[in-house]
Image (tube, coloured by chain):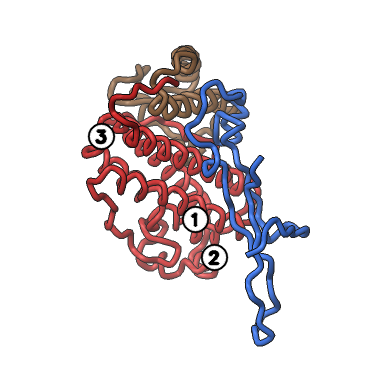
Chain colours: A red, B blue, C brown
């Protein structure tokens, strides 16, 4: 089971009232390479991954929910005090008509979250998928940073991007662990 | 010491509609070079770690908007 | 209707102290998942976990429970449901 903790992983701040940023950020909420997809993928793969990397999948999957909450916090803060007119100007008119001020699991183009979560049941295929997913999420953060002019948003996105790098590093190590000859005892 | 950003210049046609925005960059962060993380790597303090998004300076790869950097370098070409 | 009181200024710095030590624990957890025999990292993990528990206790005494389902104690009346939630501060 999980315990919720009443705090964000990182002190998220939003400096500029810019609802258009929310439209971009939602990519990492309900997009194909977003935090929800990542969390669901790892927590689903953990059941059929070899025991020695089960814990890693479990823990990275759990951390992804903390990142999802950071993104949601930014989106919420950017839109909660916007008028319908401002939302329309920000390109969120369609969103507003369907969902009001609610946050929603869709990507920056408004496409609903796709449940096609990759899970092959082959440890190497799954871990290579996960490494690729972390690199794709890293690039998405880079693209959002490139079109953002709010230093505080960029600060939080910089944190999230670095987390993708660390996760990718750990998944690469997981591959190394699974490649090891079984008789050999590795000394760290 | 690896560099974490590479550049290349694609072919520029005289018939291209927009002025060329070259060279083009892509990121090559530290996880591509580190291998299995060695033990005992230097650490950030807890506050610095939170600010950097990692506990280890050796895993930190900063990112800035490449379009904003006025000085563009040709590290490699291809 | 009375507007809810904003958190005191100290909330943000106290929260950040807790976030910092808990982030060290996240990093060490993922590291130990792939380096289970690193004794120094394990010792650091255990000492950071103790430090986090201390900060947590002080934080909860000042601002209310951090976890639910019995992982944190509550004063009367029931505090868990109180605002602000993390996305509101």
Q: Which residue is drawn at 41% across and 61% down?
A: A107
Q: In this view, does A17 lie to the left or right of A183?
A: right
Image height of C25 relative to B7, above or below: above
- Which residue in the protein does label 2 denote? A86
- Residue C54 appears in the picture as rendered: no
Q: Which secondary structure lies at badge 2?
A: helix
Looking at the image, tell me whether mark 2 or mark 3 is earlier in sequence order: 3
Residue at the disc numbered 3: A50
Classify residue A174 by image quadrant: top left
Along the polypeptide, which appears first: circle 2 or circle 1?
1
Residue C28: which numbered mark, if any? none
- A165 lies left or right of C74: right
- Report which quarter residue B69 is drawn in: bottom right
Q: Which residue is drawn at 64% across and 83% down?
A: B16
Report helix, strand or loop for mark 3.
loop
- Given contact means CB atoms under 8 Å apart, are the residues at marks 2 and 3 in contact? no
């Amino acid at each position: 089971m999980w315990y919720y903790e009443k705090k964000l992983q990182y002190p998220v701040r939003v400096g500029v009232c810019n609802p258009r940023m929310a439209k971009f950020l939602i990519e990492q909420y309900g997009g194909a390479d977003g935090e929800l997809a990542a969390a669901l993928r790892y927590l689903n793969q953990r059941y059929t991954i070899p025991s020695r990397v089960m814990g890693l999948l479990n823990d990275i999957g759990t951390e992804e929910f903390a990142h999802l909450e950071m993104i949601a916090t930014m989106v919420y803060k950017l839109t909660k005090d916007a008028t319908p007119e401002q939302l329309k100007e920000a390109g969120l008119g369609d969103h507003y008509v369907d969902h009001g001020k609610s946050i929603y699991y869709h990507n920056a183009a408004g496409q609903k979250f796709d449940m096609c979560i990759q899970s092959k049941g082959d440890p190497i295929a799954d871990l290579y998928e996960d490494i690729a997913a972390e690199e794709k999420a890293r690039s998405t953060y880079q693209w959002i940073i490139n079109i953002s002019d709010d230093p505080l948003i960029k600060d939080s996105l910089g944190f999230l991007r670095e987390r993708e790098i660390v996760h990718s590093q750990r998944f690469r190590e997981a591959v190394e662990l699974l490649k090891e000859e079984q008789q050999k005892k590795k000394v760290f | 010491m690896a560099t974490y950003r590479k550049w290349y210049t694609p072919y520029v046609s005289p018939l291209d509609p927009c002025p060329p925005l070259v060279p083009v960059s892509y990121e090559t962060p530290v996880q591509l070079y580190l291998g299995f993380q060695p033990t005992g790597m230097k650490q950030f303090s807890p506050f610095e770690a939170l600010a950097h998004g990692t506990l280890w300076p050796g895993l930190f790869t900063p990112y800035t908007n490449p379009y904003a950097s006025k000085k563009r370098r040709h590290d490699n070409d291809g | 209707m009375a507007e809810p009181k904003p958190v005191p200024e100290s909330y943000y710095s106290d929260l950040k102290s807790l976030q910092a030590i808990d982030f060290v624990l996240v990093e060490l957890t993922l590291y130990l998942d792939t380096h289970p025999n690193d004794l120094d990292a394990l010792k650091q993990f255990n000492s950071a976990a103790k430090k986090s528990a201390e900060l947590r206790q002080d934080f909860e005494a000042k601002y209310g429970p951090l976890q639910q389902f019995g992982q944190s104690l509550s004063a009367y009346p029931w505090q868990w449901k109180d605002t602000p939630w993390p996305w509101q501060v």
